[in-house]
Image: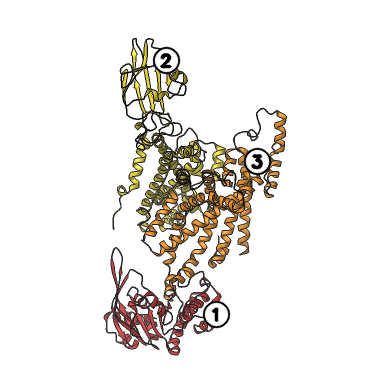
Amino acid sequence: MRRRTLTRRWSFWCLVLLAALALFGGRLFSAPPDAEVAAPFSKPFWLDRSLPPTVTADLTPDAPSAEIPWSWGAPSRFFVAADMVADAPGRTILWTKPGGRTVEIAPLKKGVERDGRDMAFKRALGLPPFADGAASLLDERGTYRLSVDGQGPWEGTVRLRLDGGRWGLFGTDQRGRDIAALFVAGIRVSLLVGIMATLIATALGTTVGLAAGYLGGWFDSAAMRLVDLLLSIPMLPILMALAAIWGKGLWQLVLILSIFSWMGTARTVRAMTLSLRDTAYIEDLRGIGAPTAYILRRHLLPETLPLLLATMTLGVPGAILSEAGLSFLGLSDPRVISWGRMLHEAQTFGTFTAGAWWMLLPPGLGIAVLCLAFLDMGKYLEERTDPRLRGGALS
Amino acid sequence: MRSYWARRVGSSVLILALVLVLNFVLFRMMPGDPVASIVDPKFSPEAKARLMEVYGLDKPMLTQFALYVKSSLSFDFGISFLTGRPVADELRSRVPNTVALLGSSLLLSALLGTWLGIQAARKRGGALERLVLWGGALSYSFPSFFFQLMLLMVFAAAIPIFPLRGSLSVPPPLGGAALFLDYVWHLALPVLSQVLLGFGGWALYVRNLMVKILGEDFILMARGRGLPERRVLRGHAFRMLLPPLLTILLLSLPGVVSGAVLTETVFSLHGVGRFLMEAVTGHDYPAAGASFFLLALLTVASTLASDLLYGVTDPRVRLERGRGR
Amino acid sequence: MIAVRNLSVTYRSSEREKRAVLGVDLAVERGRMVALAGESGSGKSTVLMAIPGLLPATAATSGEILLDGRDLLTCSEAELNAVRWRRIALVPQGAMNSFTPVLTVGRHVEEVLEVHLGLSKREARERIPALFALAGLDGGLAARYPHELSGGQKQRSAIALALACNPEYLLCDEPTTALDVVTQRDIVVTLRRLVDEQGVGMLLVSHDLPLAASVADRLCIMKDGRLVEEGEPRTVVDHPGNPHTRALVGALRELEEAP
């Protein structure tokens, strides 16, 4: 029989990778995840090679010019902004075309901005009102140059952005945010909610299960009646109502989810406690007068622990899916980026009219893979505690 | 025997009463002024007070509660804050759509799942069993709304075979047959998605039950009596599968309402699920209260019905349950 | 006649192989009762279940099982179904869950009558009282569900079910275990009467040596998958040739002589 070790499981490495991304993934991106980095609905960079990419360049006093090789059609937007401490009289921002012809973009002043779609800018360039500013500025293939020209001191940054319609690994959403960055930020929410909600639910379920199984009597029947009741009511509508009443914060969500997912654990723990309660050694302990709390904590709890770990892991997908469902319905904090929220926005803000399927795939597959990984990990832990289950679903 | 049923019915009534109280209290705890959503800030205080009176919000809490219970029990749920129409009318126009969606998808996925589960249990280790195991795992871990969004993306946006949204075309076609076909056309993708997501869970459940049943002595003995394989499967194995299967089918009814909320939101269907969702987010208590009351009624009724059906289909239960619990 | 020739059975699983039966020869004739005794795990039940082809798929068999000269081991499932119950019926172990729990015992009898004898539902129902009487039971019990019967009643129902199609041979696997002593006697007497009055050929598998010796016409003893002793019951018990049998009989004597 093949020995199954933890490191041979795909789900283990998958979870390690996702956890690492959740912790350090933010460093892969220069901008924060909610910053606008490119045109809305930009495609992933690998998708359509004929589309121009999104190009950015920063000019500083140390590097007062930047070269931009360009071999595509016109970008959808030409945008220059100066982030200055003070005006710099005598200096101008210049755009040099491959042929050597120069165009003066703007004098270098504090807070100056030029957009190819701007009427005043088009008039300054001598273009008719319906012409495309970006198209006239980038009408050749070759190397363009943006520079700060003239005399005098200046301090600050001049930023150029050419919106080509392609951006990053996964493209951008309806607000021009980087989907890859949002995806990485979403891992954290899913993991946090999934694990925290299950942890609290497990603690709650274990306490109730231990007490019900060991004490028996009215407490047991009352607790089990409550479990039956909670198991029979449909979850999502209740969660929706609670989210509407308590507010949409992340911690409220964790609490709501845990209140409605401890029942399974309580049942399992109760059953185990019942079978252990009447074993000889527990009876001996009782006989020599060990206090109930001591027996529960030092003897019954450790016995149930391995099984508990497995049930806990198997419970995580449920919490993740519930969080995603609520966020998808718009019942989550709009300031918190999560995979469910991404799908909500994708549906609300015209993914279909824009055909932007790349807004759906990363968060959706993210949820599915994360849940499958926890499911597989749970199955592995279950097999470890109960070898009879070997050869299960996803091995 | 009789006392068992008396207790079951008694606890159901108790649960319903509890739901009524919770409903009443919860929706009065929601943040925000209840009339704020329907009252324009420019309204005069008198006009506002008149509206409060129309909705009965000016009376003492206890009176409000008594009125609430009375009207809930007579299915008169008041007037929706959001639409200004009676909630009962709103629900009446939506319930058939939700029943059509959930009924057809539950039936289809249970049938497909049961058939696949039985076949998988008969031929263990085959390709079909692997399909069932994976299908089951996926239906427990795949976010339904994502799957549905992808289906929409592919079969409604990219390749426009199915409509993007709604329960009927706008304007709806004339003529009974054309109207019916249009309705089915709008329902096809939602139902298909629910079946594809749901059959795996059923198949896995049936397969596990069936593997256990097929390993029992009485199946070996039925074979030993020279009964044809079909008779062993239908007359004995399936007959044993039936009680738990019917129970789960009934018990899953309230749960699939959760599915309706998401499905109707994704496909913009005119149903109870989306109504509930809009009522909850829009602080529309009459509407939300009515939806929750109906949901509780459905839960209690399906639990009672499943107990009853188990008693009818499994003779062993009649005795055991009468004695114990 | 059922003739078992040089039968060997091996259970195979992915981890190991277990040889359950090794080169067993056995013959059961009509109107005679052969008892197969031995301790549990000796392979006697495997021999019995091998005859109607009811061993699990993990069992590999070799040898021959001849029913009037036709080898049952090479028969297809459909051919076996024609033999099962019409010619060779089974009375399973008392502890076995042999009735489908959601069907009445009467329904089980009706079903085999319908399938094998082509009777209508009404005709089948009319035959039940007589069959139940043959097994020493009241016909009214046919309307009961298996869990509503006592152990003895269940065992007698199993006998009635086995007799339904008037079989030539009856294979009884520990028909009296888990029953009290009085009921055991009654059932054994019923079985003996079937052999004498109906001319049934019977194979009785039991771990109860004195019971087997007292009722059978021929006694075979198995140990570790082999047949170690065969003969007239009195001869086997009084003059055991094999050391294992001697030990078995010796243990019995001590029990009997104990106060």
Chain ID for label 3?
B
Q: Which amino acid type corresponds to the residue marked 2 in the rendered image?
A: Lys
Percent x, y of residue B187? 54, 50
SS at circle 1: helix
Q: Residue at x 39, y 25 (%)?
A: A135
Name the chain under label 2: A
Residue toward you, A108 or C117: A108
Instruction: Tell me, for residue B7, which label it has, or none.
Output: none
Q: Quadrant of residue B43?
A: top right
Q: Which mark is residue C125?
A: 1
Q: Chain of mark 1?
A: C
Q: Which chain corresponds to the colour orange?
A: B
The residues tagged by marks 1 and 3 sit, at their Cα atoms, a distance apart of: 63 Å
Circle number at residue B80: 3
| Residue under disc 2 on the same chain as residue under disc 1 | no
The residue labelled by disc 2 is A110
**Disc 1 marks which amino acid?**
Arg
In the picture, residue A116 is in which quadrant? top left
Asked whether residue A217 is in view, the answer is no
Q: Where residue A123 appears, x then y in whole percent?
A: 45, 18
Tell me which chain appears yellow: A
Q: Secondary structure at mark 2?
A: loop
User: Which residue sits at x=45%, y=37%?
Assistant: A338
Query: What's under tag 3, amino acid-wise?
Result: Ser
Chain assigned red: C
Q: In the image, is A150 to the left or to the right of B155?
A: left
- Measure the C-alpha gap from mark 2 to mark 3: 54 Å
* Relative horizontal placement of residue A194, taking residue B179 as reference (left or right): left
Nearest to the eye among marks 1 and 3: give it: 3
Residue placed most toward the observer, A164 or B280: A164
Quadrant showing the C terminus of chain B: bottom right
